Amino acid sequence: MIDSTPRSLVFDVFGEYVRADGGYLTLGALSRLLGPFDVPPDSLRVLMSRLRREGLFDTVRSGRHSFYVPSERGWRVLDEGYVRIMGRPLAPWSGEWYVVIYSVPETERTARVRIRKRLAWLGFAPLAAATWVSPRDRLDEATAMLEGEPCVRYDRLVARSVGPEEDRERANRAWDLAGLADRYREYLARWEPEVERVRATPPDPEAAFVRRIQVIHEYRKFLFEDPDLPMPLLPPDWPGSRAHEVMLENFEVLREPAMRHYREVTAAMPGPPEDRPSPAVPPLPGTL
């Protein structure tokens, strides 16, 4: 069983598989795809209704069938996750730190938790309770998020430290780099041997589909811990880069049988309404 939430499973299926297949999916087909992950149909129905209320999905009715398709906002969320998982910053570090300082009333604890989680996803970490830093310029994304929280007051700064030793000390204080390196090594021990194993003996389509989602979900956890620190801030022999390569290798070698399983499951799915134009499905980022 994969330690994941049904919400992230839904986003993985739409972001990778449904995108390549026209954008539509029925609830029944989605339920069959998520069957190996122990997502009950009733729970999935409730989840999809919630995602629709959040403005992330639209629905189209045709007879007794409902077709789900990501909204424009939903595709933006999917693309953001894709870029974070598949891409790595290549530009050299400017030596600058991007700082967000915010204040939230004590009565708005839910907003505080939401802001912290979102800042962590963007690659920020706390130097103090409400002072978060990142070596990558994601101030625009942070600003867009903070502007959506009416209760918050915030300041943004760009700063530079007095030297490389202080930069490395700051990185070690903000992020648990030793613990993160250990978790990367555990990921490598689990998935590095799988690449050649799958090449030698391809799994059946359903097993490939499950394994491909698993390799992404186990890697996704790092996105909340690893801000893609520049090399000058990292300890020697950093395993994160190799872990990313191994994730991509597994993802690619499992692509064909996993897609075959998706097409087998959706082969009997009814088509969308004939009078409904095909949804605008954006290409994967970087393929324009």
Image (cartoon, rainbow, N blue to C red):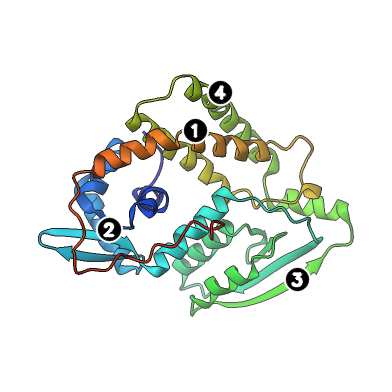
> Image point 61% across, 40% down: which residue?
244
Q: For the residue marked with disc 3, what is the amino acid? A: Val
Please give the residue where the numbered disc 2 appears in the rendered image: 48
Gap in angstroms between the C-alphas marked 3 and 4: 42 Å
Residue 195 disc label: none
Label 4 is placed on what type of residue? Pro
The amino acid type of the residue labelled 1 equals Val
Instruction: Please name which of the two marks, 2 or 3, marks the residue nearer to the observer.
Output: 2
The label nearer to you, 3 versus 4, is 4
Q: Which marked residue is nearer to the observer: mark 2 or mark 1?
A: 1
**For residue 119, above or below residue 17:** below
Residue type indicated by callout 2: Met
Q: Up-down: is 9 above or below 274?
A: above
The residue wearing badge 4 is: 193
Residue to which mark 1 is pinned: 253
Pick whichever of labels 2 and 4 is earlier in the sequence.
Answer: 2
Circle 1 SS class:
helix
